[in-house]
Amino acid sequence: MSFDVLSHKHVPIEIYGETGSLIVPDPNNFDGEVRLSTVKNEWRKVATKRPYADANYRIIGLAEMAHAIRAGRPHRANGELALHALEVMEGFQTSSDSGPPSKSQAVRIGRRRCRRSSARGGSTSRARKRGAAWIRKHPMREALIVWGGWSGHEPEQGARIVASMLESEGFKVHVENTTEAFADPAIRNMSLIVPIVTMSKIEKEEVENLTAAVRSGVGLAGYHGGMCDSFREAVDYQFMCGGQWVAHPGNVIDYRVDIAKPDDPIVQGIDGFQYRSSNITCMSTRRTRCWRQPPSRASTRPGRRAS
């Protein structure tokens, strides 16, 4: 794996695993045969499901990046994948220098952790290939969390919890504590935006860029007053969210929550339950239904849409 010698007769890369050996073509090109041996001295050609073509297309990485920018998604030949490849190569060298890895060692494959299950590198090699295939099928999604406003809703703590949830689902998460993040044109490349802000203010250019991003297809998610009572003076934001908190009639009360659509995936497995919390009333746009608790009723009813 070096260009530093005058000449040689070795194949570019051979990988020796627990149950077989693998020969891959020259990585300096984008074509060539991949050969696998699982029986001693017998090699077979492995069909590539996603060939580049039949020539040396070095420009394909740049072309894919341009396509990704237009599609609003992360490009594939990114820093994360490069560091992953470097990590695997260093793992080969480390294993060679220090001897067989122990069962407790682990390597990061893409965005998952895969443990070496034997004293030799075959399991790691197979996991590496599975991880690379997973990356091709699932380009990393990115999410932006912006927290701030009234401290009573504990926005910073909430941001940490949501970030952890998203990271466990394979998201690359960006966390900011100023609404200035909404003005960045790059938010249109996000898969998801999560505002966790209560009773704050937002500048015109910030809300315009945010609503444009959501209109272009970026996902929007939030909870409680962190999204539905973020900016009381920003009407465009309220229409984007679908509603705005109004009041707490009766303040904290006891009531029952009944599941209106138990077949909805969001509430599957959840039965009705008694609860004690703030009574919330909000107005909603014609696109969204908002839940409120009438003080005289024992169960929740959908709130009326704003006219």
Image (spheres, rainbow, N blue to C red):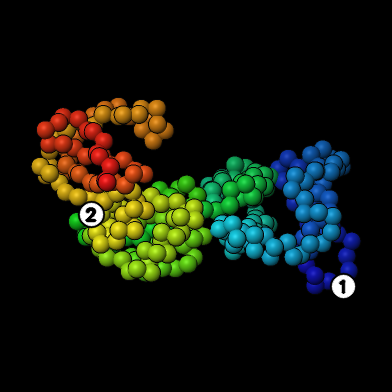
Q: CA distance from mark 1 to mark 2?
A: 67 Å
Secondary structure of the residue carrying numbered label 2: helix
- Foreground pick, 39 / 299: 299
Visible in this render: residue 97? no
- Placement of the N terminus among the 4 image quadrants: bottom right
Q: Give the amino acid at mark 2.
A: His
- Report the side of 190 relative to 252 (left or right): right
* Residue highlighted by disc 2: 153
Q: Give the number of the disc on residue 6.
A: 1
Q: Give the amino acid at mark 1.
A: Leu
- Foreground pick, 124 / 96: 124
Residue depicted at x 30% and y 29% = 259
Give neighbour class at mark 1: few <14, some 14-19, many 20+ (Cα, 10 Å). Answer: few
Q: Of the residues tagged 1 and 2, which is closer to the observer? A: 2
Give neighbour class at mark 2: few <14, some 14-19, many 20+ (Cα, 10 Å). Answer: some
Residue depicted at x 27% and y 60% = 231
- Report the side of 175 relative to 123 (left or right): left
Secondary structure of the residue carrying numbered label 1: loop
- Foreground pick, 63 / 155: 63
Res. 26 image quadrant: bottom right
